[in-house]
Image (tube, rainbow, N blue to C red):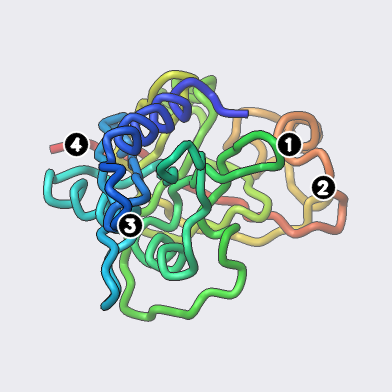
Amino acid sequence: MLIAIEQRLLDAALTTASRLPADGTYVNTVASAVMDIHGDIYTGVNVGHFTGGPCAELVALGVAAAAGADPISLIVAVGDDDRGVMPPCGRCRQVLLDQQPDCRVIVPDGDDVSSVPARKLLPYPSPHPDANPPRLLRFSPQHWDSVVDGVKTATTRFDDPAAPGPATLLFELDDGYRSLPGAVESVESVRFADITDAQAALEDCTADELRAALRTYYYPGIVDDDMVDFVRFRVVAEG
C-alpha cells in the first residue's frame, strides 16, 4: 500500500506510459518517474533497440540530473498496455545502489504494490569502490521539531545502514518531504539489549523507552541479540 506521495509518483509514471505510441515497434514500452527530496518529479521512457538501449529508469535519472535535481528519494517504472508497476532489471538495481542507494523503489507486491529500499532489491551487489553517492537519513515527521531544536542527535537503525559523512536528513510526510542538510558523525554497532540510557538520551528518552518504541513502531520482529546501528548525526547550518 502506498502513501499519498508515492501514489503521486506512480500516477506520473502511468500518465507518461499512457502517452507511449502503440505502433508495435517496441521502441518505447516502459515509463519511469523519479522524485527528488523536494518532491519534484522527473519522467523518462526506455529507448529499445536491437543493439541495446537505456531502461526507462536510467532515462528518468538522466532527466533529473540534467535538470539539476537534488538526491532521488523515490523511483517507479510501469509498462505500457496497462502492465502496471514493473521491478527494475539487474543493471538498474546496481545503478541505483551506486548512485542513489537510499532511494525507495515502488515494486509489485502480490496483488498490490509497495515501496522498498533500493538495497533490498540486490542483496549481493558488485562493489563499486569509486562510488560516492549522496546519502539520505530518513525520519518520521514527528521528529522534525526535536531534530531542529537539537534535542534529538541520534537515531537507532536495524538493517538500515548509514555511513559517516554528509547526508540529507529527510522527513517523510504522507504527502511531501521536509529536509535539512546534515552529517552523520559516527555509526556504532551495538546489541539491541545493550542500548544504554546515555545513548538513548541523545534520542530524548530512556533505553527502555527506546527499545519499546523500536519494537512497537519500526522493528516488531527485533530480538535482544540483534545488532543495531547507533547513528549520531547533526544538522549542518546552511550558507
Does residue 166 appear anywhere in the picture? no
Q: Residues within 10 Å of mark 3 (few under 14, many from 20)?
A: some
Give the Cα distance between marks 3 and 1. Answer: 47 Å
Instruction: Identify the residue position indicated by label 4 in the image.
Output: 238
Element on which disc 4 rests: loop
Q: Which residue is mark 3?
A: 26
Mark 3 or mark 1, which has the lower sequence index? 3
Label 4 sits on what residue type? Glu
Give residue 203's position: percent from left, percent from top.
Answer: 60, 34
Query: Could you tell me the amino acid type at mark 3?
Result: Tyr
Asked if disc 2 and disc 1 are in contact, CB closer than 8 Å, the reply is yes
**In the foreground, 22 or 3:** 22
Type of the residue with mark 2: Ile
Residue at (86% x, 58% y) in the render: 225
Residue type highlighted by circle 1: Leu
Q: CA distance from mark 2 to mark 4?
A: 37 Å
Helix, strand or loop at mark 2? loop
Q: Split into 4 quadrants, where in the image is the N terminus?
A: top right
What residue is shown at x 49% (from left), y 46% (from top)? 105
> Looking at the picture, does residue 7 appear above or below residue 190?
above
Q: Circle 3 sits in a helix, a strand or a loop, which is it?
A: loop
Are discs 2 and 4 less than 8 Å apart at CB?
no
Q: CA distance from mark 2 to mark 1?
A: 8 Å
Give neighbour class at mark 4: few <14, some 14-19, many 20+ (Cα, 10 Å). few
Q: On the image, which quarter does residue 119 sit in?
A: bottom right
Specify which label sits upstream in the sequence, 2 or 1: 1
